[in-house]
Amino acid sequence: MKMMSQRQVYGEKLVSLGEKYKNIVVCEADLGKSTMTYMFQERFPERYFEMGIAEANMVSFATGLALTDKIAFVNTFAVFASGRAYDQIRQGVAIGKFNVKIVGSSSGLSDFGDGATHQAIEDIAIMRAIPNLTVLAPMDAIELEKMMDVIVDYDGPVYMRINRNDLPALYPEDKPFEIGKPVVIREGKDITVFAHGVMISMALKAAEKLEKEGISLRVVNVSSLKPLDEEMIKEYASGVKGIVTAEEHNYMGGLAEIIPSILKEMSIPMESVAVRDVFGQSAHSYEELLVHYGLTDAEIIEGVRKILEV
């Protein structure tokens, strides 16, 4: 299985887009070697603004740049993008619908070494609650690249979360990315798994194992968390025996609440795989944290078995 870095692809794509769009500017919060925006700095130093550890000021500065018809990419860790700069995003970027792209790197538990203070397990819930803000969570580096082609032409504020670690490259090359549209990654007839990010690869592992037992999983990538085409969610939930949601995020405010709210009129069993309303912690590896917090194919399989009672 090919592994790819979302961060690496993000940095390279930012440079590529900078060649085409002369009005792209990049703001960084002293993390350029981690977010990979240093690539843009090396190629376009005159369009790169190192703001230091001052995320709130950085967002306000980016809003000013957007007022001069610039496409402003704001970069920091996801936990700081959604937390430290919340007020400036709400009051400045979102209310005015300004063309600022907020990119939260090292999302979820992926910054395994730095612990709870650097792990964003509530960023989707925070950002989805802000009106006018589009919220995206690419499943891998392939989708991230497609996503960037779309958001650079989208006139309005966007939040996109990026994983720190290499992830399996699984997004179909022939599938376009469209804001609001979930994408079926694997067809199935017994259970639908709605997931995003690293949990797509976990759902596909679960599907392969269960297939040997005659159980068929439909795996749906919900990378556009806001807006979200509710009719498509209902369509993918129809004709199956149950639903499992899987996410590297707190179940509060994530897919575990989003999907049931859409399917409230459907009588269908549901199980969720998510962080159970606790903070993260330091570990020796990313995989160690995923296992500890129950974010693996094993938990998805367990959810399927609960629904099917097998």
Image (spheres, rainbow, N blue to C red):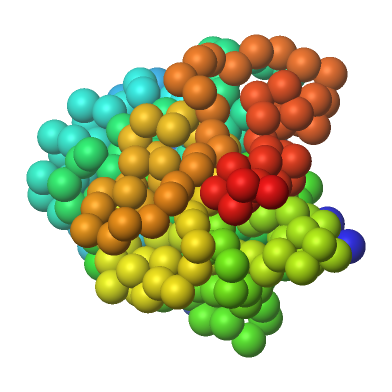
Left/right of residue 128 with respect to residue 5 in the rendered view: left
Q: What x and y, as percent, mark residue 305?
A: 65, 47
Residue ID at (75%, 41%): 298
Q: What x and y, as percent, mark residue 163?
A: 63, 43
Is residue 54 visible in this depiction of the protein? yes
Nearer the observer, 141 or 12: 141
Is residue 157 visible in this depiction of the protein? no
Asked where in the image residue 288 lies, by quadrant, the reply is top right
- Residue furthest out toward the front: 309
Picture layout, residue 307 above or below residue 85: below
Q: Quadrant of the N terminus?
A: bottom right
Residue ID at (34%, 69%): 234
Q: What x and y, as percent, mark residue 263?
A: 29, 57
Q: What x and y, as percent, mark residue 8?
A: 71, 52
Residue ID at (37%, 67%): 233
Residue ID at (84%, 18%): 284
Picture layout, residue 171 above or below residue 51: below
Count of marks, rendered view? 0
Nearer the observer, 223 or 266: 266
Asked where in the image residue 168 lies, by quadrant, the reply is bottom right
- Residue furthest out toward the right: 1
